[in-house]
């Protein structure tokens, strides 16, 4: 698992083996943040791309998470995550 911190959000990036191939890695991530007294989270999973090794999948999961967070900051209103 890889961890990163981006714009006040904590990212846990990891990968799991694809059930259909048992050789390809599926990028996944959990993003955590605090709004007032409440701790929130968002799970992400790449639905299309697969990777040949764990490291590449985890790096992609970090990038995927940062893109998700960046979209929140670029949105006109930051209401719902």
Image (spheres, rainbow, N blue to C red):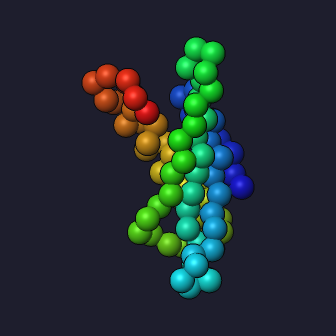
In percent of the image, x 59 and y 72: which residue is there? 25
Residue sticking out furthest to the right:
1
Compared with 11, 51 (above or below) is below
Residue sticking out furthest to the left:
76
In percent of the image, x 58 and y 14: which residue is there? 36
x then y, percent, for residue 3: 68, 45
- Determine whether, in the image, residue 32 is placed left or right of residue 74: right
Count of number-bearing discs: 0
- Determine whether, in the image, residue 74 is placed left or right of residue 57: left
Quadrant containing the C terminus in the rendered view: top left
In percent of the image, x 44 and y 69: which residue is there? 49
In percent of the image, x 55 and y 62: which residue is there? 27
Whether residue 52 appears in this view of the structure is no
Looking at the rendering, which quadrant does residue 54 occupy? Answer: bottom right
Whether residue 67 appears in this view of the structure is yes
Residue sticking out furthest to the front:
38
Looking at the rendering, which quadrant does residue 52 occupy? Answer: bottom right
In depth, the one of 39 and 28 nearer the eye is 39
x then y, percent, for residue 62: 56, 50
Compared with 39, 63 (above or below) is below
Quadrant containing the N terminus in the rendered view: bottom right
x then y, percent, for residue 80: 40, 29
x then y, percent, for residue 2: 69, 51
Compared with 3, 33 (above or below) is above
């Amino acid at each position: 698992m890889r961890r990163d911190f981006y714009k006040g959000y904590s990212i846990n990036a990891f990968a799991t083996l694809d059930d259909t191939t048992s050789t390809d890695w599926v990028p996944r991530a959990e993003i955590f943040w605090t709004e007032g007294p409440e701790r929130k989270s968002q799970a992400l999973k790449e639905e299309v791309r697969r990777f040949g090794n764990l490291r590449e999948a985890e790096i992609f999961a970090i990038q995927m998470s940062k893109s998700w967070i960046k979209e929140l900051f670029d949105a006109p209103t930051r209401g719902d995550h």
